[in-house]
């Protein structure tokens, strides 16, 4: 089964304002980086299956989460 994932989402105004403020005060972050960190953390926290495939995806999400948090910028 192939599942397509496309993200176009409306978010509450409070979250939008908070995200906007965060991005204005953290120039090393952008919207894509925030969403990748948030989604990977959500998936890590909500994984409940214990199958080999789910273990693979859990590790992949953990890698994305950590890489996103510790991503280096061109500015050093």
Image (cartoon, rainbow, N blue to C red):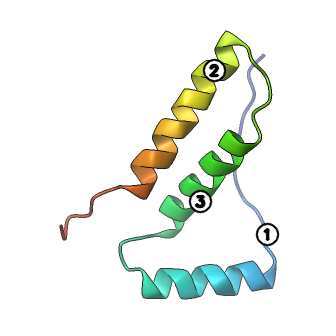
- Rendered residue at 74%/21% (across/down): 2
Residue nearest the viewer, comparing 13 with 3 = 13
Q: Position of residue 70 (x, y in %)?
A: 36, 55
Q: Earlier in the sequence, mark 2 or mark 1?
A: 1
Q: CA distance from mark 3 to mark 2?
A: 22 Å
Instruction: Identify the residue under disc 3.
Output: 35
User: Around disc 3, counting alpha carbons within 10 Å, would you say few (fewer than 14), some (14 to 19), or many (20 or more)?
Assistant: few
Residues at marks 3 and 2 touching, judged by CB atoms closer than 8 Å: no
Instruction: Identify the residue under disc 2.
Output: 55
Of marks 2 and 1, the one in the foreground? 2
Residue nearest the viewer, comparing 75 with 7 = 75
- Rendered residue at 46%/70% (across/down): 30
Q: Position of residue 76 (x, y in %)?
A: 18, 67
Q: CA distance from mark 1 to mark 3?
A: 13 Å
Specify the label residue 10 is tagged with: 1
Q: Secondary structure at mark 1?
A: loop
Q: Secondary structure at mark 2?
A: helix
């Amino acid at each position: 089964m192939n599942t397509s994932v496309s993200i176009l989402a409306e978010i509450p105004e409070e979250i939008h304002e908070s995200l906007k403020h965060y991005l204005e005060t953290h120039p090393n972050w952008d919207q894509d980086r925030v969403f990748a960190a948030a989604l990977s953390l959500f998936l890590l926290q909500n994984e409940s299956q214990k199958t080999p495939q789910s273990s693979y995806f859990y590790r992949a999400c953990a890698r994305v989460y950590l890489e996103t948090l510790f991503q280096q910028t061109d500015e050093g």
